[in-house]
């Protein structure tokens, strides 16, 4: 009795000549992890959005399509340059800052990938094609981040050829096995449906995902269907045809499910574009969180500018903008409709969302200005989260930082002085000096306003630094760099071109100097040529003058 093809598994399938089916010598399975954040209770406090997320791990494995065996596996860690590695990101990726602190940049990672491809494929004249689980990696993230950082991608990444595993699975089911029920195309569900091993080696999420994808590829390739892993997405060829035809139409994917005509027009106009016509593809699966559509412009040049919006967010969703043409519009005519003028009442209004008082446009909480008309938010939501801290240089840092982003001061050295208080507003939590009657950031009143200016004896000796002074009017302790009292505004009782202190102070030695940076004022030893706290260079006017003779034994 012949074996049912549906029962084929990678272990029992024959991979003798799959090269006659897969038209490439090598398949490169590619996986990325990127910075991310989540704050369901206060969306305005999110530190990383999908529009500015950065790659932190690039993993790829290579399959020889003649034998369907792995020939290479490589994981490249990437240090983010513009966004933090949040606790949420570490929680879901398992990647810590200690792993990334010495890693290369995104540009370095692309060079490492290119080095392998040039040496092992281009030089050996082997054809290759990428495989990804979904289109986000090549269609959005790599191209958007490279564009934002002015990095020129190799041609095979800028004009990629790729198989989207999700699309291959859907084609396999629709054309050959409609009897198979797939809940989703997630790797977990695919492995359960096909009875495949889901790799959990704990090397990394990226490596495990790539090796699991390899198992699914082997399974599908074993059927040797003439339309599975045969015709890849060829962005280079599609773009060339788009330009040759001077097409004025682009395709939009990943749009918010209840996006309105006004929101879409505002998104384009905020980027200097105005489409002549837009269409939405009527959703047949209302469980999906996004919809697709098309936009037609007055000119081919505007359509090309529209492609540059690929990866930009509408609300909190990154939009994929790709090439299209009139033939596609004609073929899909029966499925096209206009975008709604008003949002469905089922739209979820999140905490902090606001309607513009000028044009009534619905804006997300994180926006300081209206997305449509740029009017200011009349009631901006504070962007601090519990655990935020303020450095002595005045810079506001997120809870995850152990050192100040501006001056690199160690957080553990930032002391809370007597009377200092944290704002009781849970959306702010700003650290305020004892003398403040209301929060410096959100103006919430001090819950315990009783304040008695401290005397020098109330401070540990280590906190009273060389050149510091007590106000003769209110006895407030002031740093050496202040020329007027922080509490009452009375001028400093004496002026001097350089910091001074009386003899007998054991912590001050000849040649020691005070940093001239007004936001720092750190006491440095004589041997330092740059401030130990902020890096400011030493200058002769900052040397501490010791008054009075110091007896020598």
Image (spheres, rainbow, N blue to C red):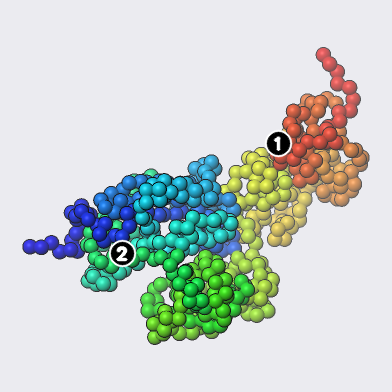
Please rate how many residues cluster around mark 1, counting C-alpha atoms within 10 Å: few if below 14, some from 14 to 19, many from 20: some
Q: Which residue is mark 2?
A: 230
Q: CA distance from mark 1 to mark 2?
A: 61 Å
Considering every residue shown, the one lying at the far left of the view is 1
**Could you tell me how many numbered marks the image carries?**
2
Considering every residue shown, the one lying at the far top of the view is 553
Q: Secondary structure at mark 1?
A: loop
Q: Give the residue displayed 64% in from the left and 50% down from the top.
A: 397
405 w.r.t. 195: above or below: above
Q: Nearer the viewer, residue 490 or 526?
A: 526
Q: How far across and down, in percent of the image, does residue 93 sit?
A: 45, 51
Q: Which residue is mark 1?
A: 532
66 w.r.t. 327: above or below: above
Q: Nearer the viewer, residue 23 or 219?
A: 23
Instruction: Choose the circle earlier in sequence order: 1 or 2.
Output: 2
Q: Is residue 225 visible?
A: yes
337 w.r.t. 134: above or below: below
Q: How far across and down, in percent of the image, does residue 18 sit?
A: 24, 57
- The quadrant in which the N terminus is found is bottom left
Q: Nearer the viewer, residue 452 or 320?
A: 320
Q: Give the residue displayed 39% in from the left and 66% down from the top.
A: 233
Q: Nearer the viewer, residue 73 or 156?
A: 156
Q: Is residue 182 visible?
A: no
Q: Secondary structure at mark 2?
A: loop
Q: Nearer the viewer, mark 1 or mark 2?
A: 2
Q: Is residue 313 left or right of residue 486?
A: left
Q: How far across and down, in percent of the image, does residue 89 sit?
A: 49, 53
Please rate how many residues cluster around mark 2, counting C-alpha atoms within 10 Å: few if below 14, some from 14 to 19, many from 20: some
Q: Give the residue displayed 86% in from the left and 33% down from the top.
A: 500
């Amino acid at each position: 009795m012949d074996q049912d093809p549906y029962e084929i598994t990678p272990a029992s399938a024959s991979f003798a000549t799959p090269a006659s089916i897969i038209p490439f010598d090598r398949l490169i399975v590619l996986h990325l992890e990127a910075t991310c954040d989540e704050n369901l209770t206060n969306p305005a406090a999110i530190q990383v959005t999908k529009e500015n997320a950065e790659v932190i791990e690039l993993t790829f494995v290579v399959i020889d399509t003649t034998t369907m065996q792995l020939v290479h596996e490589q994981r490249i860690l990437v240090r983010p340059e513009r966004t933090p590695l949040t606790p949420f990101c570490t929680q879901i990726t398992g990647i810590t800052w200690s792993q990334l602190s010495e890693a290369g940049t995104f540009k370095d990672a692309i060079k490492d990938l290119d080095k392998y491809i040039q040496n092992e494929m281009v030089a050996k004249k082997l054809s290759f094609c990428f495989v990804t689980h979904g289109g986000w990696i090549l269609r959005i993230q790599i191209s958007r981040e490279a564009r934002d950082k002015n990095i020129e991608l190799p041609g095979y990444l800028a004009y990629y050829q790729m198989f989207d595993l999700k699309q291959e699975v859907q084609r396999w089911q629709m054309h050959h096995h409609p009897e198979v029920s797939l809940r989703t195309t997630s790797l977990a569900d695919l492995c359960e449906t096909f009875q495949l091993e889901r790799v959990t080696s704990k090397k990394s999420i990226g490596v495990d995902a790539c090796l699991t994808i390899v198992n699914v590829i082997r399974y599908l390739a074993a059927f040797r269907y003439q339309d599975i892993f045969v015709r890849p997405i060829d962005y280079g060829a599609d773009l060339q045809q788009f330009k040759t035809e001077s097409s004025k139409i682009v395709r939009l994917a990943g749009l918010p499910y209840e996006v309105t005509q006004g929101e879409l027009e505002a998104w384009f106009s905020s980027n200097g574009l105005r489409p002549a016509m837009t269409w939405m593809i009527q959703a047949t699966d209302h469980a999906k969180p996004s919809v697709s559509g098309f936009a037609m412009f007055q000119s081919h040049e505007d359509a090309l500018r529209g492609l540059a919006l690929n990866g930009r967010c509408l609300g909190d969703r990154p939009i994929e903008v790709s090439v299209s043409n009139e033939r596609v519009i004609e073929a899909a005519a029966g499925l096209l409709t206009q975008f709604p003028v008003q949002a469905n009442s089922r739209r979820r209004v999140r905490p902090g969302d606001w309607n513009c008082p000028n044009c009534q446009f619905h804006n997300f909480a994180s926006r300081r200005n209206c997305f449509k008309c740029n009017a200011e938010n009349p009631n901006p939501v504070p962007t601090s989260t519990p655990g935020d801290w303020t450095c002595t240089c005045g810079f506001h840092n997120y809870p995850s930082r152990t050192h100040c982003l501006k001056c690199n001061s160690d957080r553990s050295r930032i002391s809370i002085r007597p009377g200092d208080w944290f704002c009781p507003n849970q959306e702010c939590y700003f650290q305020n000096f004892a003398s403040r009657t209301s929060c410096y950031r959100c103006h919430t009143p001090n819950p315990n306003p009783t304040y008695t200016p401290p005397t020098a004896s109330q401070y540990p000796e280590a906190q009273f630094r060389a050149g510091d002074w007590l106000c003769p009017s209110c006895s407030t302790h002031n740093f050496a760099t202040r020329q007027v009292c922080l509490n009452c505004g009375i001028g400093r009782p004496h002026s001097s071109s350089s910091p001074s202190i009386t003899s007998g102070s054991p912590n001050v030695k000849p040649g020691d100097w005070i940093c001239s940076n007004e936001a720092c004022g750190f006491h440095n030893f004589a041997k330092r040529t740059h401030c130990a706290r902020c890096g400011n260079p030493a200058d002769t006017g900052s040397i501490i003058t010791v008054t009075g003779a110091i007896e020598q034994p």
